[in-house]
Amino acid sequence: MVAVTPNEDAQRRSLINLRVTPRDRDLIDRAAALLGKNRSEFMMEASRQAAEDALLDRTAFRLDATQFAAFMERLDAPPAPNEGLRKLLATPAPWEK
């Protein structure tokens, strides 16, 4: 393990300050506690996921006509049978229990 000096650690991290209502803070704290996380961990995880989703929703890729046809064919094809899928389909939904 490499030792990190306090100065190096400070350079690797940035502080983000947010103003929130007490109601929002309490909501975040309750959710974080439920997941066994602290407020910062919870907010960082939620923010990171939202950022990734926003970026992935806007990611474009280019295909020529042949590649697009093959892509659409795979999307339209039924999933290949596999053990995980069989197990999922055999599991009752929570509301059926």
Image (spheres, rainbow, N blue to C red):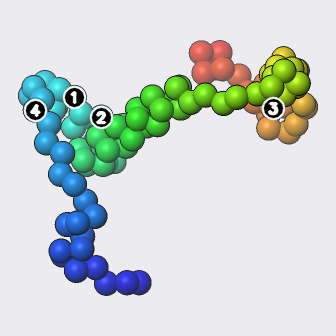
Identity of the amino acid at label 2? Answer: Ala
- Callout 1: few (<14), some (14-19), or many (20+) C-alpha neighbours within 10 Å? few
Q: CA distance from mark 4 to mark 2?
A: 18 Å
**Closer to the N terminus: mark 3 or mark 1?**
1
Q: Position of residue 68 (x, y in %)?
A: 81, 23
Residue 1 on image: x %, y %: 41, 84
Q: Residues within 10 Å of mark 2 (few under 14, many from 20)?
A: some
In depth, the one of 39 and 3 nearer the eye is: 3
Report the quarter where the C terminus lies. Answer: top right
* Discs 2, 1 touching: Cβ within 8 Å: yes
- According to the picture, the residue beneath numbered tag 4 turns out to be 19
Earlier in the chain: of badge 3 and badge 2, it is 2
> What amino acid type should be assigned to the residue bearing mark 3?
Leu
The quarter holding residue 29 reads: top left
- Which is more N-terminal, label 1 or label 4? 4
For the residues bearing labels 3 and 1, Cβ distance under 8 angstroms: no
> How would you rate the neighbour count of disc 4 (Cα within 10 Å): few for under 14, some for 14-19, many for 20 or more?
few
Tag 4 near tag 2, CB within 8 Å: no
- Mark 4 or 3, nearer chain start: 4
For label 3, the SS is helix
In front: mark 4 or mark 2?
A: 4
Q: Which residue is mark 2?
A: 31
Mark whose residue sits in front, 4 or 3: 4
Q: Residues within 10 Å of mark 3 (few under 14, many from 20)?
A: few
Marked residue nearer the N-terminal end (4 or 2): 4
Q: Which mark is residue 27?
A: 1
User: Is residue 48 found left or right of 13 in the rendered image?
Assistant: right
Residue 5 placement: quadrant: bottom left
Q: Residue at x 46, y 37 (%)?
A: 52
Which residue occupies 66% across, 20% down? 93
